[in-house]
Protein backbone atom coordinates (compact mmCIF):
# COMPACT_ATOMS: atom_id res chain seq x y z
CA UNK A 1 0.00 0.00 0.00
CA UNK A 2 1.47 3.38 -0.94
CA UNK A 3 2.08 6.01 1.69
CA UNK A 4 1.16 9.67 1.26
CA UNK A 5 3.92 12.12 0.37
CA UNK A 6 4.49 14.04 3.59
CA UNK A 7 7.81 15.76 3.00
CA UNK A 8 7.77 19.30 1.59
CA UNK A 9 11.10 18.60 -0.07
CA UNK A 10 9.71 15.53 -1.86
CA UNK A 11 6.56 17.34 -2.98
CA UNK A 12 8.61 20.29 -4.27
CA UNK A 13 10.87 17.91 -6.20
CA UNK A 14 7.84 16.22 -7.76
CA UNK A 15 6.17 19.50 -8.68
CA UNK A 16 9.33 20.75 -10.38
CA UNK A 17 9.67 17.65 -12.58
CA UNK A 18 8.93 18.33 -16.23
CA UNK A 19 9.49 14.78 -17.47
CA UNK A 20 5.98 13.55 -16.76
CA UNK A 21 4.33 10.54 -18.27
CA UNK A 22 1.02 11.50 -19.86
CA UNK A 23 -1.94 9.57 -21.16
CA UNK A 24 -5.30 11.15 -21.87
CA UNK A 25 -6.33 13.35 -18.95
CA UNK A 26 -3.79 11.79 -16.52
CA UNK A 27 -0.13 12.54 -15.91
CA UNK A 28 2.44 11.08 -13.53
CA UNK A 29 5.70 12.52 -12.21
CA UNK A 30 8.22 10.29 -10.45
CA UNK A 31 11.19 11.22 -8.30
CA UNK A 32 13.55 8.84 -6.54
CA UNK A 33 13.48 8.69 -2.77
CA UNK A 34 15.48 11.48 -1.13
CA UNK A 35 18.04 10.60 1.54
CA UNK A 36 16.39 10.52 4.92
CA UNK A 37 12.99 9.53 3.54
CA UNK A 38 13.02 6.25 5.42
CA UNK A 39 12.80 2.80 3.89
CA UNK A 40 14.29 2.48 0.42
CA UNK A 41 11.43 0.29 -0.82
CA UNK A 42 8.67 2.82 -0.06
CA UNK A 43 6.20 4.16 -2.56
CA UNK A 44 4.77 7.55 -1.67
CA UNK A 45 1.94 9.08 -3.68
CA UNK A 46 0.42 12.56 -3.88
CA UNK A 47 -2.43 13.73 -6.09
CA UNK A 48 -2.84 17.01 -7.99
CA UNK A 49 -6.48 17.42 -8.94
CA UNK A 50 -7.43 21.04 -9.47
CA UNK A 51 -10.76 22.80 -9.21
CA UNK A 52 -11.16 22.73 -12.98
CA UNK A 53 -11.85 18.99 -12.65
CA UNK A 54 -15.02 19.60 -10.64
CA UNK A 55 -16.44 20.38 -7.23
CA UNK A 56 -14.91 18.84 -4.10
CA UNK A 57 -17.16 15.77 -4.17
CA UNK A 58 -16.12 15.00 -7.76
CA UNK A 59 -12.41 15.59 -7.08
CA UNK A 60 -12.47 13.40 -3.97
CA UNK A 61 -14.23 10.58 -5.81
CA UNK A 62 -11.60 10.71 -8.54
CA UNK A 63 -8.81 10.76 -5.95
CA UNK A 64 -10.26 7.65 -4.24
CA UNK A 65 -10.46 5.83 -7.58
CA UNK A 66 -6.87 6.75 -8.44
CA UNK A 67 -5.69 5.69 -4.98
CA UNK A 68 -7.17 2.21 -5.51
CA UNK A 69 -5.44 1.98 -8.90
CA UNK A 70 -2.11 3.03 -7.38
CA UNK A 71 -2.61 0.36 -4.68
CA UNK A 72 -2.91 -2.19 -7.49
CA UNK A 73 0.29 -0.92 -9.12
CA UNK A 74 2.21 -1.12 -5.85
CA UNK A 75 1.02 -4.71 -5.35
CA UNK A 76 2.32 -5.47 -8.87
CA UNK A 77 5.77 -4.15 -7.92
CA UNK A 78 5.87 -0.46 -8.77
CA UNK A 79 9.37 1.08 -8.60
CA UNK A 80 9.91 2.70 -5.18
CA UNK A 81 9.94 6.48 -5.02
CA UNK A 82 7.70 9.51 -4.86
CA UNK A 83 4.82 9.80 -7.35
CA UNK A 84 2.62 12.76 -8.17
CA UNK A 85 -0.53 11.76 -10.06
CA UNK A 86 -2.43 14.58 -11.73
CA UNK A 87 -5.73 14.75 -13.56
CA UNK A 88 -7.30 17.15 -16.00
CA UNK A 89 -11.06 17.74 -16.36
CA UNK A 90 -11.81 14.80 -18.71
CA UNK A 91 -10.73 12.25 -16.09
CA UNK A 92 -14.05 12.27 -14.23
CA UNK A 93 -15.89 11.01 -17.31
CA UNK A 94 -13.73 7.89 -17.66
CA UNK A 95 -14.77 4.46 -16.49
CA UNK A 96 -12.65 2.66 -13.91
CA UNK A 97 -11.08 0.45 -16.61
CA UNK A 98 -10.29 3.47 -18.77
CA UNK A 99 -8.64 5.18 -15.79
CA UNK A 100 -6.61 2.00 -15.17
CA UNK A 101 -5.42 1.96 -18.81
CA UNK A 102 -4.48 5.66 -18.83
CA UNK A 103 -2.68 5.40 -15.49
CA UNK A 104 -0.72 2.36 -16.70
CA UNK A 105 0.32 4.17 -19.88
CA UNK A 106 1.30 7.32 -17.98
CA UNK A 107 3.40 5.26 -15.55
CA UNK A 108 5.06 3.50 -18.47
CA UNK A 109 5.95 6.78 -20.18
CA UNK A 110 7.52 8.49 -17.19
CA UNK A 111 11.27 8.91 -17.12
Image: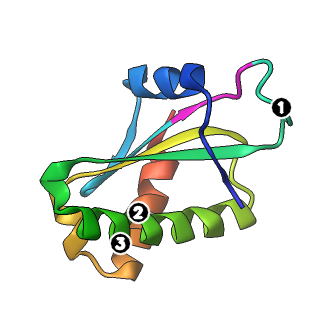
Q: Is residue 40 left or right of residue 60?
A: right
| Residue for point 61% across, 28% down | 7
Residue holding disc 2: 63
Which quadrant would residue 25 be assigned to in this image? bottom left
Say what secondary structure mark 2 lies in: helix
| Residue for point 52% across, 64% down | 67
Pointer 2 or 1: first along the chain: 1
Marks 3 and 2, how far apart at CA: 5 Å
Q: Which mark is residue 69?
A: none
Marks 2 and 1, how far apart at CA: 25 Å
Residue holding disc 3: 61
Q: Main secondary structure of the magenta part?
A: loop
The residue furthest front is 56
Q: Which mark is residue 38?
A: 1
Closer-to-camera residue (104/7): 7
Q: Which residues are magenta?
A: 30-34
| Residue for point 25% across, 57% down | 24
- Mark 3, other Cα within 10 Å: few <14 / some 14–19 / many ≥20: few
Residue 63 horizontal/vertical position (percent): 41, 62
Say what secondary structure mark 3 lies in: helix
Q: Are marks 3 and 2 in contact (CB under 8 Å)?
A: yes
Marks 1 and 3, how far apart at CA: 30 Å
| Residue for point 61% across, 36% down | 6
Closer-to-camera residue (87/22): 87
Residue 94 horizontal/vertical position (percent): 26, 75
Say what secondary structure mark 1 lies in: loop
Amino acid sequence: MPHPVRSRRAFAALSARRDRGRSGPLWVAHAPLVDGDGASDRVEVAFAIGRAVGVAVVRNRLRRRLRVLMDERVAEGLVPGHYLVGARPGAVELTFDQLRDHLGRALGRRS
